[in-house]
Amino acid sequence: MLISCRRATELTSQELDTELSFHRRFVLGAHRFVCGACRRFRKQLVDIDRALEEFLNDPTGPADVQMTDESKTRIREVLKSATSDDDANPIAY
């Protein structure tokens, strides 16, 4: 039984945070075996995770970087729009 891409992305995200059960690892691996998009998603997620980890652990990194109020507002608007779009177009598993 294959899972949907939506479920595969959720499990991929969980996989980076915690160890999945054998069954979940198996179905996720089977899905990724046939789905190139989900393989690419995992690679991108791993790359982002690695880059963020390097950035946060860099002792010479910009510890005092501040986000402008305009940037914060723009991010809030995008998140609010994305949330309302998700509510309007639910995807079934």
Image (cartoon, grey):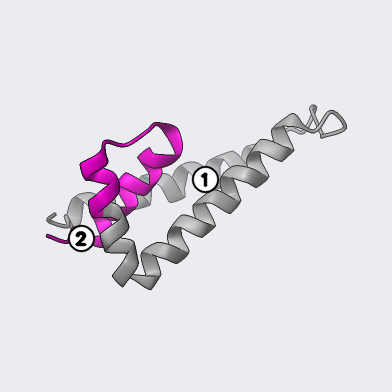
At horizontal 72% and vertical 39% (from top left) the residue drawn is 54
| Residue 85 shown in magenta | no
Q: Is residue 3 above or below residue 51?
A: below
Q: Amino acid at mark 2?
A: Ser
User: Which circle marks residue 21 in the picture?
Assistant: none
Pointers 1 and 2 in contact (C-beta within 8 Å): no
Instruction: Say few, some or many: other residues with alpha carbon within 10 Å of mark 1 (under 14 / 14 to 19 / 20 or more).
Output: few
Please tell me whether mark 2 sits on a helix, a strand or a loop.
Answer: loop
- Where residue 29 appears, as percent x and y from the top left, is 31, 56
Range shown magenta: 1-27
Pointer 1 residue? 75
Q: Nearer the viewer, residue 70 or 51?
A: 51
- Where residue 22 appears, as percent x and y from the top left, is 26, 40
At horizontal 21% and vertical 43% (from top left) the residue drawn is 23
Image quadrant where one finds the N terminus:
bottom left
Residue farthest toward the right in the current orientation of the protein? 60
Q: Amino acid at mark 1?
A: Ile
Q: Nearer the viewer, residue 72 or 22?
A: 22
Quarter of the rendering containing residue 32: bottom left
Pointer 2 residue? 4
Q: Nearer the viewer, mark 1 or mark 2?
A: 2
Real-space CA distance between mark 1 and mark 2, rounded to the nearest whole angstrom:
29 Å
| Residue 2 shown in magenta | yes
